[in-house]
Image: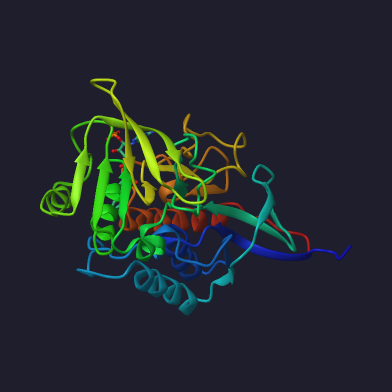
């Protein structure tokens, strides 16, 4: 069995989305030896967004383009990048912390958790079985497969309504199935959907089952006011019902909300000394690129201060 490589850093940032890359810029500029590690390539969730139009200074930007700029900016200050690292174990509690991937053991004095969140699942029959066969959590990735087809989006937040509008570029009809009769999405996004002739709202309705053999054929839904059950024929289902934090590796090690979001103070300090959290993974009222980037900057500055105040030595 080959021995794992050991690498030593002042701080390791877990997650290469806007929070992680912003933290990397600030940490490197704070002159601490910094690594950023991700299970995939860098860019996080916004890397999959077709358009971002509320990041200040960029009236409209492609999500991928904006995240590429973040990454290049972090490169400029010398961050060491480790993409495609499947982390198996993390020890947050010891003074010298360890993060173990399949082939590397990272030893570090501090950790910034910026692992973001993943799409929540509906948890109904057919969802798992038909994933990739009509069930998708990424309109930008899969929208083009639905040219002239019918799709259903589930949810009433910004993601659901924005992605439904995006899907009308391809699909001939997009249903938005929402459990209430009022959307949660921002007014400007709602207006776009209300004015889009390809979008039809199915109010006060929850999905019960996704049907199909090799591909999605229909979704069975229930009106929560009348209890009436109906079946909508559709080629694709895009659930956008919020996000679940990527915290499986840390669960039980630090304080979290009942949903798993990590609790921090205003300095992004978690319940463990030397461990900071930033972006969508933490308990925060707003989840945007700008707030993730802001969290990352705060976390890195707090981390630099922590390292100044705690002269930790890692034996080589
Ligand atoms: P969200 O704001 O939490 O909305 C989730 C939606 O799904 C809600 O409408 C919710 O209904 C519904 N829902 C939740 N659980 C459900 C279930 N089990 N079955 C059916 N419906 C369910 O999530 P999001 O839209 O993904 O947004 C997440 C964050 O990212 C937000 O802070 C959002 O503002 C931000 N975001 C911003 C932009 C932008 O500014 N351009 C774009 C995307 C996302 P209820 O309304 O009844 O709770």
Name the one closer to the observer, 109 or 313.
Answer: 109
Q: Residue 29, image x and y in percent?
A: 46, 70
Q: Does 187 sit above or below residue 209?
A: below
- Residue 138 occupies quadrant: bottom left
Residue at position x 25%, y 46% from top?
175
Figure label count: 0
Residue at position x 54%, y 72% from top?
79
Ligand 1: image quarter: top left
| Residue at the top extreme, as displayed | 226
Residue at position x 23%, y 39% from top?
184
| Residue at the right extreme, as displayed | 1
Q: Residue 46, image x and y in percent?
A: 38, 61
Name the one closer to the observer, 15 or 97.
Answer: 15
Q: Does 144 sit above or below residue 180?
A: below
Residue at position x 41%, y 73% from top?
68
| Residue at the bottom extreme, as displayed | 76
Q: Quadrant of the N terminus?
A: bottom right
Q: Does 173 sit above or below residue 285?
A: below
Residue 304 horizontal side relative to residue 199, left or right:
right
Q: Quadrant of the C terminus?
A: bottom right
- Residue 196 occupies quadrant: bottom left
Q: Residue 294, image x and y in percent?
A: 35, 56
Q: How is the image coloured?
A: rainbow
Q: Residue 311, image x and y in percent?
A: 63, 56
Q: Does 248 sit above or below residue 63?
A: above
């Amino acid at each position: 069995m080959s021995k794992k490589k050991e690498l030593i850093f002042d701080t390791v940032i877990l997650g290469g989305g806007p929070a992680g890359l912003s933290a990397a810029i600030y940490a490197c500029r704070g002159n601490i030896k910094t690594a950023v590690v991700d299970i995939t390539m860098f860019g996080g969730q916004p890397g999959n967004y077709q358009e971002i139009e509320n990041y200040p200074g960029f009236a409209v930007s492609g999500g991928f383009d904006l995240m590429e700029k973040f990454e290049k900016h972090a490169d400029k200050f010398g961050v060491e990048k480790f993409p495609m690292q499947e982390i198996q174990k993390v020890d947050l509690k010891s003074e010298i912390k360890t993060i173990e991937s399949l082939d590397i053991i990272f030893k570090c004095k501090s950790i910034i958790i910026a692992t973001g969140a993943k799409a929540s699942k509906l948890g109904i029959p057919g969802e798992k079985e038909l994933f990739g066969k009509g069930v998708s959590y990424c309109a930008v990735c899969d929208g083009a497969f639905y040219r002239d087809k019918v799709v259903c989006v589930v949810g009433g937040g910004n993601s659901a309504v924005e992605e439904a509008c995006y899907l009308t570029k391809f699909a001939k009809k997009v249903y938005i199935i929402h459990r209430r009769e009022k959307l949660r999405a921002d007014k400007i996004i709602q207006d776009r959907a209300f004015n889009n002739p390809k979008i039809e709202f199915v109010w006060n309705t929850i999905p019960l089952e996704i049907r199909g053999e090799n591909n999605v054929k229909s979704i069975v839904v229930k009106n929560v006011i009348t209890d009436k059950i109906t079946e909508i024929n559709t080629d694709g289902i895009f659930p956008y019902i919020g996000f679940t934090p990527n915290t499986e590796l840390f669960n039980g090690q630090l304080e979290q909300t009942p949903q798993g979001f990590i609790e921090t103070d205003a300095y992004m300090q978690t319940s463990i000394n030397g461990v900071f959290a930033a972006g969508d993974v933490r308990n925060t009222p707003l989840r945007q690129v700008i707030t993730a980037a802001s969290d990352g900057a705060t976390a890195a500055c707090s981390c630099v201060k922590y390292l100044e105040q705690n002269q930790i030595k890692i034996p080589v």
